[in-house]
Image (cartoon, rainbow, N blue to C red):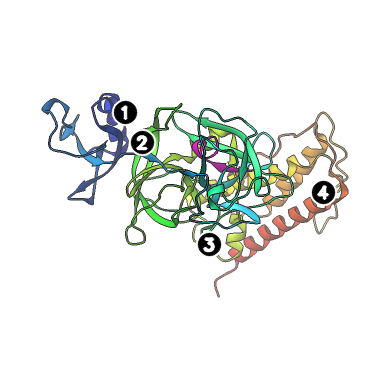
Amino acid sequence: MATVDELVAIKERVEQELLARPGVTGVDVGYKEVGGQRTDQVAIRVHVARKTDDVPHEERIPEQIEGAVTDVVERRYELHVTSVEIDVSAQADTTHYATLQGGISMGPSRVIDNHIFAGTLGAIVIDNATHAHAALTNFHVAAVDSGWHAGDRMVQPSRIDTGVVPSDEFGAILRATLSGNVDGAVISIDAGRASSCTVAEIGDVRGSKAAALGMAVRKRGRTTGLSYGTVDGIAATVNVDYGDGLGVHTLANQVSIAADTAHNAIFSDHGDSGSVIVDSDGYVVGLLFAGAGASTVANPISAVLSELNISLCVGKSIIKDIKDGRKDFIKDKDFRKEIQKELRKELQKELALDKRVKDIRDVFKDREHGPDPDPGPLGPGGQGLEQRLRAVEDQLSKLGGFVGPELRPDLLTPLTGQEPLTDAETRQLRAELEQQVADAVAAKTEFDAPPA
């Protein structure tokens, strides 16, 4: 029996010929269905707008391709944005959120052909260009059509859902992309507007992860709220009609989600576009953009983050999780990689803000030997920062049983040319770093303690 990787390779060799056949809307690798019920057999699946026996022999999908089992599933994909005439009443989630977070209603301020639009703010992210918080959604939610511009204003909730322009506006399009892999947009967040690294009804975003067949997932969207599903297809290539001015686009390497009918009849519907799809531990695997009945399709989150030049805004840290009593995943490889990534991200994020933190040595001082020497200002060579980074390494080395040297990131990369912090910013940074070190030490001590 062919492996999943072998099936993906076969699919990639034949998908263009399959997509060219009349009525075919997509091709992926996923679970074969028999009598409408999912089986455990993985096959090359050909998606069609309508299943029928009235198909010419030369257009029929063979039962096997290069020795791989095939399946035919009925799926006509539609964008999961919603639009209405401008004078209709509100629908779905109409909450005005004081703190922006994932899973809530949003839409453009502008009116397009006398219609207003609604989708979902998927998650709060970090703009890698500015390190500022921003909001993630779909291109077709924020930009809608070919008439969009950077700077177009957004409203929360959407105008369909009682949002008022301009009083409920929260930001503007920074950049957007509709490529061969991603339907995404990044929205700025206005100064003074609060945001949280959480998804409503789901909780803290923990990071990102690749989707895998059989993975249990959730999403929270503007229309259908919290829903549950399973990854039932990977490496999907789908054709989706984006309407006047944009036409049909083909997106490759997508993720297919089947509804978990024990919880919900469908996984998503119109208005849920832009939702992030997360696994059972809160790791984001995809960005929802279209659907077909009970099936949903999403961009892989790695492609979204790369093309939009953003990072996920992560909630409660893994260190805090361990301090709270979770120790089951400490020896897991994924955990080891994740804590390495988290340490790198958190420490470098704080140090990127450190333009001139003359007293940061207090955070990492050795309790027995007194404070470190004054590291001095950050010069062109980055000597002061290097000394401070070595102090961080010294503290991490004391957590040897918790985070070994092989897991710690390379922190000795000078970050120079920065502006000085204010005294208030310095005090806040010092307090945050002190708490991080204290949490890590406490977690290590608790982990090393013998069982009661």
Residue 235 circle label = 2
Q: What amino acid type should be assigned to the residue bearing mark 3?
A: Lys
Residue 327 circle label = 3
Q: Which residues are magenta?
A: 134-143
Q: Earlier in the sequence, mark 4 or mark 1?
A: 1
Residue assigned mark 4: 425
Q: CA distance from mark 1 to mark 2?
A: 9 Å
Q: Secondary structure at mark 1?
A: helix
The N terminus lies in quadrant: top left
Q: Earlier in the sequence, mark 2 or mark 4?
A: 2
Q: CA distance from mark 3 to mark 4?
A: 34 Å
| 443 left or right, relative to 199 | right
Q: Residues within 10 Å of mark 4 (few under 14, many from 20)?
A: some
Residue assigned mark 1: 12
Q: Residues within 10 Å of mark 3 (few under 14, many from 20)?
A: few
Q: CA distance from mark 4 to mark 1?
A: 52 Å
Q: Nearer the viewer, residue 172 or 3?
A: 172
